[in-house]
């Protein structure tokens, strides 16, 4: 296997200048950032440019334009020929606009340019974006942002996937990004993020339901205090234990959720998440997969049982 050539861009284009794009721009354009760093033997000026279709359209659009100007980043609303100068393009638009952005950019990109797709998309959507970019002669890297730009700036943790992920990661690390290479398969980084979101956004929704009800009952601090046992083991171990024991204890937990639903209704909280949990547990109970000996199975066995007997659905 040949070692990928080092990435040495002279022009970086940001597609989307919202929270993600502007955070990356601030990192690249800081006094000690990529734009101002000297590169021995190369006198070409380093430039960061931006495209955002919301530019000056409303208060948000005017704000992002002001931030670009503050950073000295030329910004336009349209996909202009200037994009052809970019050696590296970072797309950070909403997921529903990712394919549109990739299609618009692909016609203007120079052959061999790197296209870093930071958009929140499914694995299949990432494959669609990749196909468009590669058809135009550029190279595609699937990137999943696993943390908040708001809290971390351009150092938000990211997963990279694709044939050029290793070389891209080396360059990004040198610029202060926090990145991990997942593998050579485009779409896999996005798939990991989607599955992570099932868990984390689910916890977020559960917190809304639980904490509002707890506060109405005057026991919020007590509820928050009772989570101390979760701090005793890594989160990964905690949730995998929950899943493995689910096969054994689904009936008891299902019955408990009926009382939880009743409690929420007594508090005046619509039990949206609680009903879904009860329905999920009921599916496991009805599948009758609980082991006769009452022993908790290994994680892989539990997942095999749940996949074969409980979790249904068809691919789009």
Image: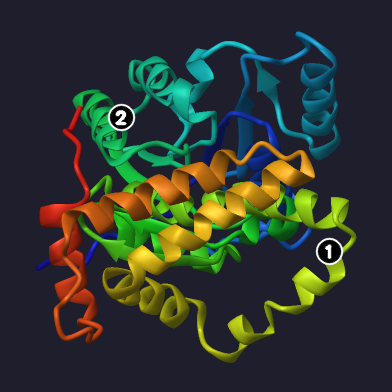
Dot 2 and dot 1 residues touching (CB under 8 Å)? no
Residue drawn at (30%, 29%) of the image: 129
Residue drawn at (42%, 58%) of the image: 254
x then y, percent, for residue 141: 33, 46
Residue of label 1: 220
Q: Quadrant of residue 122?
A: top left
Residue 266 lies left or right of residue 242; in this view the side is right
Answer above or below: position of 222 versus 12: below
Q: Counting other residues with Cα less than 10 Å from the Cα at mark 2, is it few (<14), some (14-19), or many (20 or more)?
A: many
| Nearer mark to the viewer, of 2 and 1 | 1
Answer above or below: position of 15 versus 289: above
Residue of label 2: 129
Which residue, as the protein is rendered here, is positioned at the far bottom?
Answer: 232
Quick check: can you spot residue 41? no
As helix, strand or loop, the secondary structure at mark 2 comes to: helix
Q: CA distance from mark 2 to mark 1?
A: 45 Å
Q: State which quarter of the image contains the N terminus.
A: bottom left
Q: State which quarter of the image contains the C terminus.
A: top left
Quick check: can you spot residue 24? yes
x then y, percent, for residue 214: 79, 57
Q: Earlier in the sequence, mark 2 or mark 1?
A: 2
């Amino acid at each position: 296997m040949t070692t990928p050539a080092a990435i040495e861009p002279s022009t970086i284009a940001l597609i989307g200048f919202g929270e993600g794009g502007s955070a990356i721009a601030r990192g690249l354009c800081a006094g000690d950032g990529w734009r101002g760093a000297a590169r021995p033997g190369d006198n070409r000026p380093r430039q960061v440019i931006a495209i955002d279709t919301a530019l000056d359209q409303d208060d948000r659009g005017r704000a992002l334009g002001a931030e670009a100007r503050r950073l000295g980043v030329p910004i336009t609303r349209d996909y202009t020929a200037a994009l052809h100068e970019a050696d590296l393009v970072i797309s950070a638009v909403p997921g529903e606009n990712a394919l549109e952005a990739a299609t618009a950019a692909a016609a203007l990109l120079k052959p061999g340019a790197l296209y870093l797709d930071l958009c929140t998309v499914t694995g299949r959507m990432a494959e669609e974006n990749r196909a468009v970019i590669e058809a135009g002669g550029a190279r595609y890297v699937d990137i999943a942002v696993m943390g908040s730009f708001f809290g971390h700036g351009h150092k938000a943790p990211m997963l990279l996937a694709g044939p050029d992920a290793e070389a891209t990661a080396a360059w990004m690390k040198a610029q202060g990004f926090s990145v991990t290479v997942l593998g050579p398969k485009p779409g896999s980084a996005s798939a990991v993020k989607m599955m992570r979101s099932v868990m984390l956004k689910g916890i977020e929704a559960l917190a809304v339901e639980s904490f509002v009800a707890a506060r109405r009952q005057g026991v919020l601090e007590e509820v928050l205090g009772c989570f101390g046992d979760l701090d005793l083991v890594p989160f990964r171990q905690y949730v995998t234990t929950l899943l493995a024991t689910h096969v054994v204890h689904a009936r008891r937990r299902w019955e408990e959720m009926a009382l939880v639903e009743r409690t929420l209704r007594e508090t005046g909280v619509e039990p949206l998440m609680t009903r879904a949990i009860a329905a999920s547990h009921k599916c496991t109970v009805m599948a009758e997969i609980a082991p006769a000996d009452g022993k908790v199975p290994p994680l892989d066995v539990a997942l095999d049982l749940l996949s074969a007997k409980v979790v249904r659905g068809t691919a789009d």
